[in-house]
Image (tube, grey):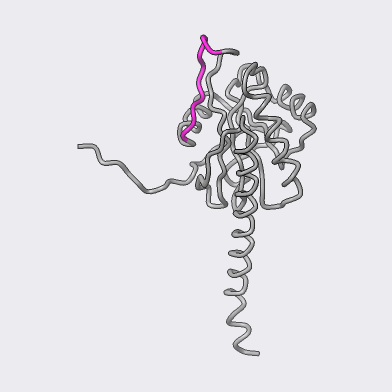
């Protein structure tokens, strides 16, 4: 008899290289809210729409210190670090706020499954890869808090609103934690 685990598991450890040849790991997003997605630079279908919509997220939150974007390439053979750098320049985006990540298929595809999205090679698909157009909102504890269709502008507007809520919750929790730590000091005043 199969028993399903209903406990939410945080996103597991990972290590990828971004467009600036910097290693990005779970430590890079520790205590930060982030959006993850899966794409490839030569995608002839949904990726250009996804990146146009993600640019609105980047522009709105590029000055927020507790926020990042992780875009995982599913075509590591062609999406070299140099190609990701050129793609980032074309989008006019900067790391570490928006990281275009390169890694091995053996690392990328299982991570996509953990995010509960589709990402795989498929010779019959346009561009040779099949993938989800999902944007995944992840909280500061690496728990998925939302799924949004990155090709639908209304979904991205909803996600931006949800990001604001998470950031406000995070700031409030941090403020309360600091007050908790300072409480013993106030008792002696």
Instruction: Look at 56% across and 50% down and name the residue there.
Output: 139
Choose between 187 and 6: the one closer to the eye: 6
Question: Does the magenta segment cover residue 119?
Answer: yes
Image-based side of 41 in relation to 140, left or right: right
Q: Position of residue 133 (x, y in %)?
A: 57, 29
Q: Position of residue 57 (x, y in %)?
A: 69, 41
Q: Relative to 175, does residue 55 appear above or below in the rendering?
A: above
Image-based side of 58 in relation to 125, left or right: right
As drawn, the residue found furthest toward the top would be 124
Q: Relative to 50, does residue 61 appear above or below in the rendering?
A: below
Instruction: Look at 63% across and 84% down and name the residue there.
Output: 186
As drawn, the residue found furthest toward the left would be 1
Q: Position of residue 86 (x, y in %)?
A: 77, 24
Question: Does the magenta segment cover residue 186?
Answer: no
Instruction: Give the position of the N terminus as an image quadrant.
Output: top left
Picture quarter containing residue 151?
top right
Q: Relative to 29, does residue 134 appear above or below in the rendering?
A: above
**Magenta segment range?**
116-125
As drawn, the residue found furthest toward the bottom would be 189
Picture quarter containing residue 49?
top right
Q: Relative to 112, does residue 142 appear above or below in the rendering?
A: below
Q: Of helix, strand and loop, which mostly describes the magenta segment?
A: loop
Q: Position of residue 90 (x, y in %)?
A: 79, 26
């Amino acid at each position: 008899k199969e028993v399903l685990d209903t406990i939410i598991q945080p996103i597991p450890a990972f290590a990828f290289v971004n467009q600036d040849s910097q290693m990005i790991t779970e430590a890079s997003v520790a205590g930060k809210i982030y959006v993850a997605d899966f794409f490839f630079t030569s995608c002839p279908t949904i990726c250009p729409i996804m990146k146009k919509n993600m640019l609105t997220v980047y522009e709105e939150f590029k000055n927020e210190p507790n926020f990042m974007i992780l875009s995982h390439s599913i075509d590591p053979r062609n999406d070299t670090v140099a190609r990701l750098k050129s793609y980032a320049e074309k989008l006019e985006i900067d790391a570490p706020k928006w990281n275009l990540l390169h890694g091995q298929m053996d690392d990328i595809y299982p991570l996509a499954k953990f995010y509960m999205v589709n990402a795989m090679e498929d010779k019959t698909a346009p561009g040779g890869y099949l993938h989800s157009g999902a944007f995944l909102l992840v909280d500061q504890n690496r728990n998925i808090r939302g799924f949004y269709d990155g090709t639908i502008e209304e979904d991205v507007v909803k996600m931006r609103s949800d990001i604001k809520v998470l950031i406000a919750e995070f700031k409030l929790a941090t403020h309360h934690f600091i007050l908790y730590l300072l409480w013993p000091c106030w008792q002696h005043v």
